[in-house]
Amino acid sequence: MVVALRYVWPLLLCSPCLLIQIPDEYEGHHVMEPPVITEQSPRRLVVFPTDDISLKCEARGKPEVQFRWTKDGIHFKPKEEVGVTVHEAPHSGSFTIAGNNSFAQRFQGIYRCFASNKLGTAMSHEIQLMAEGAPKWPKETVKPVEVEEGESVVLPCNPPPSAEPLRIYWMNSKILHIKQDERVTMGQNGNLYFANVLTSDNHSDYICNAHFLGTRTIIQKEPIDLRVKATNSMIDRKPRLLFPSNSSSDLVALQGQPLVLECIAEGFPTPTIKWLRPGVPMPADRVTYQNHNKTLQLLNVGEQDDGQYHCLAENSLGSARHIYRVKVEAAPYWLHKPQSRLYGPGETARLDCQVQGRPQPEVTWRINGISVEEVAKDQRYKIDQGTLILSNVQPSDTMVTQCEARNQHGLLLANAYIYVVQLPATILTGDNQTYLAVEGSTAYLLCKAFGAPVPSVQWLDEEGTTVLQDERFFPYANGTLGIRDLQANDTGHYFCQAANDQNNVTIVANLHVKEATKIIQGPRNAIEKKGSRVTFTCQASFDSSLQPSTTWRRDGRDLQELGDSDKYFIEHGHLVIHSLDYSDQGNYSCVASTELDEVESRAQLLVVGSPGPVPRLELSDRHLLKQSQVHLSWSPAEDHNAPIEKYDIEFEDKEMAPEKWFSLGKVPGNQTSTTLKLSPYIHYTFRVTAINKYGPGEPSPTSETVVTPEAAPEKNPVDVKGEGNETNNMVITWKPLRWMDWNAPEVQYRVQWRPQGTRGTWQEQIVSDPFLVVSNTSTFVPYEIKVQAVNSQGKGPEPQVTIGYSGEDYPQASPDLEGIKILNSSTVLVKWWPVDLAQVKGHLRGYNVTYWWEGSQKKHKRHVHKSHVVVPANTTSAILSGLRPYSNYHLEVQAFNRRGLGPASEFTFSTPEGVPGHPEALHLECQSDTSLLLHWQPPLSHNGVLTGYVLSYHALDEGGKEQESLHLPDPELRTHNLTNLSPNLRYRFQLQATTKEGPGEAIVREGGTMTLSGKPDFGNISATAGENFSVISWVPREGQCNFGFHILFKALAEGNMGPNLEPQYVSYNQSSYTQSGLQPDTEYEIRLMKERVVLRQMAVKTNGTVKDKEDTQVDSEARPMKDETFGEYSDNEEKAFGSSQPSLNGDIKPLGSDDSLADYGGSVDVQFNEDGSFIGQYSGKKEKEAAGGNDSSGATSPINPAVALE
């Protein structure tokens, strides 16, 4: 048998049963048992007429138990009593008395049952039998109760006594309950109390009903006639207590039971009742107030409830008080109950009977139901503070003892036997059991032994030595051996030996210690945003001989049980949770387990995000609406694990701007109410949104709508302006008030104006639109302007005066030029004198400088492209940059106002020579292993007269080598051959054109000779054919040196009469070649040749597709061609290199616009036609012009500078 030790511990909890009874596993011995009471009637029995009376007493024991009874201390024989039936069942001494009223009265008394066999006598507790007849109300004459209106009265009930609790009801003859309130109350005693009577209380049928639950009957008292005399002057009086009637009383409360205190008062006006406990608060969790506060009920009374309780009756005339002095006492209860036990000969028996109660209970002992005082004196008996001690017990000392504790509140009884037996030692645990455990845990090896005397148990190792020398080994009283902090070398055999004075026995236990399960990497706490995903990792190690298991749990439950397969993804030690929501947060754990152990690693997941919606929004203090205020309060939103930083309060006006929300402000996140200052005449509907660091949450539900009263405007329009759009008018404009500033259903504007400085009468007009045109004005005259908001409730505040002007005219004067300064070949400084402001006829907005290139100093350009620079009014100069060197320019300067441009001042100037642009299209052509031929095109922008070129070059692979430079003085030169180059080096070549100002920008190329380039690579070469032509195409390899080669076509068909095709010279960078003059429907062989070496070979058929000649394909080793294949040719027949390529010096279309103005810094935004007339908003652009031909001196057009207005 193999025992997994993770399940052993519950078995240990059962081991104390050895001390109570002989184990069921103990076989082969006949064992007796002293009597044990198993069932008995309750301590108090109340019976009613016709009820059967059953007194129970059942017990077990070996040999069979015999029963006897006593009644009131006298021997009682149920079998000899008439009407009594004795139960003849095994182990039972119960009997039943048939239901009969006379019988019940005769059998009243206190009963006790005794159960005996040869080992002793057990005794039941006292059973009090009470017989109660049918309840009857004693006959009485009930006189009418007369009382004056306003006085108090008590209607008595006085029901018949009963052993069982009864219920009292006050009703009238119509079986309707008498209404009770603070004035009319029924007390705990059943009486009906009136604090003061009213004429409405005048009734002749106040009936007290008593409900006897035991007999299931209700009896009625004779009706009471209450007669109330009306009075016109009810006299007020202070309270007086009707119950209790004295000022104080003493009360005993039982521990664990409820305490009920009552105070009923009379007076006029009707008093109210308060309950106080001086110096101590009422226990709110256990106290309740009933019957309109007249009754205090305190549940589960304890010693701490001991003390005074005050009830206070109050009305407007005074008060009355009653003091309850409560003393908490207790019926007897067990501290230590004596337990039955087996003993071996010579042992000492000790039975503890420790009880508590208030007052302290009296403890008495019995032996076999007889008081110890009546038992023959024996020196071996000793009673010490409730403990019965019997030393050196022998089998003849077997007995049943009774411990009884009693005070005035009750009694306790316990039977406990001392059973002295002699039994040989036996180990009840199976022999040769195997136990499995893991390192670091605790193993429990079982050795359940039994015998009398109790056997001694010891554990031995394989050498017969006690194992307790190792402090990790520890024994239990029940024989179990514990081994803590298990190690691998603890694996082995262990021997349990049990012995008493009769024999000894031994069993072996086999222990196997396995490697403990460990979590190497467990999940870590995570904080993730809503909607994202999280991954938890769990890596564990297991003993190879055990079956491993890894599971994931959330808040203690396996994730498989949660049933959301789309939410959770578990694979290879990873848990992935997708689409995180706030409901996903919690504690996640990885559980690695085997059949022997289990380890768990936990991590907490917090899901964060923007707050939840504000759940509740309320408006209050509506009276504040008259002052355009309202109080707003709300419930806090769920913060979703990120503190709420603030609440945004918004409103919507469904009349003026439906579905558009406006913010009224924000309040701190710890605030949940605010008083808002509102604007007049707005239909406010509010909502509140919580905001945390992740953003705003969902808004709250909207509030109800409130409307603020109308009021005169509190604001006037802003941005008031007066400007003319004609020379004889002034347009007054302003920014209209927002609707939320109207303070009424509509708003208008009171516009006033007068010439500045006249202090004359204001002209005015009330309009609805946000503008007014004043006609018939002089040109550019200043006016004082005021605009005031008005509505049905009045005018807005006094408006501020704004100065406006009537319409402008074009400027009448042109600026005088001061001069032009040449700064360099592409930049000049233009200066002019300020224009006379009186001639501007408006506000001077600035100056417009227009200039254009008229051509180089060698050749004029046909097309004119104008550029503009706009400067502010306080600036009288402009820098023109980006000009073309060696060029002629025309210049105009004009002042402008809002109306447009004035007349222009004109001037011409020329720019000096500059350095040229970079040469175009530099190509390298391989001539040999040591030479290269360079081809180039002249620069597009000469910027002067070209004087030649400078060629520089150096090897890239030898960084320290000096650069070689060659001056080429011929400006018409287009090629140059370089020799004596290293065949194994790459070079960087730099070519610059020169003017008298020096060399210009360089063009750079890198490359090497034929040796460095290697075998020519034609890439994806292909050939296609038409009816009489073929096109060969290839892709030049990047970095491959350019070179020339021949293409030869030869017809393969016999008898072909077509003309002979001469070899054609082609350059590698050309990428394609077209051969014309072919015969239709003819197959041709094509060869690519250089210096009699075949570079590539293929075939094509006219009016067909390519056929690769795999059998004749040239391999990586280029082979020489046979002399007889084609006609004679010479490499010296090469044409000019690049002749088949497109020209690189064609005209480039100019960019830009003739009308462009430079950016005006955002302050002035104007545009002019070619004639200088104002056409409105304009934005500047940059333009670029290109020159044509080799002799062009054109450069890119000037870059228009942007001059910002301050």
Image: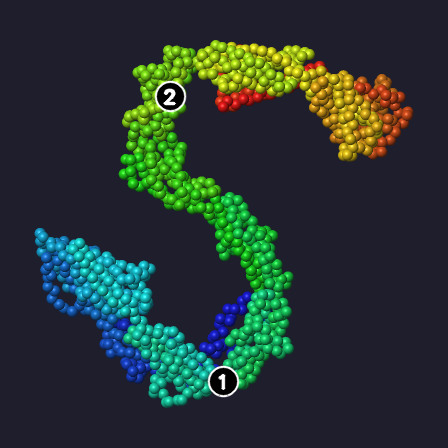
Q: In this view, does 1010 lie above or below 869?
A: below
Q: In this view, does 291 lie to the left or right of 429?
A: left
* 895 or 568, nearer to the observer: 895
Counting from the top left corner in percent of width and height, residue 395 is at 45, 86
At 81% across and 33% down in the image, what residue appears?
A: 984
Kindly identify the amino acid type of the residue bearing the numbered disc 2.
Thr
Q: In this view, does 1137 lie to the left or right of 813?
A: right
The part of the image, by quadrant, that contains residue 770 is top left
Q: Is residue 172 above or below residue 912?
A: below
Counting from the top left corner in percent of width and height, residue 809 is at 45, 12
In the picture of the structure, the residue carrying the numbered disc 2 is: 802
Q: Is residue 866 above or below residue 329?
A: above
Q: Earlier in the sequence, mark 2 or mark 1?
A: 1
At 28% across and 66% down in the image, what residue appears?
A: 307
Answer yes or no: is residue 1079 visible: no
**Distance between the alpha carbons at the discs numbered 2 and 1:** 124 Å
Secondary structure found at label 1: loop
Q: In this view, does 222 lie to the left or right of 945?
A: left
* 321 or 598, nearer to the observer: 321
* Label disc, if present, on residue 422 of the rendered structure: 1
Are circles 2 and 1 on residues that touch, CB within 8 Å?
Answer: no
Answer yes or no: is residue 643 visible: yes
At 68% across and 17% down in the image, what residue appears?
A: 913
* 897 or 876, nearer to the observer: 876
Kindly identify the amino acid type of the residue bearing the numbered disc 1.
Gln
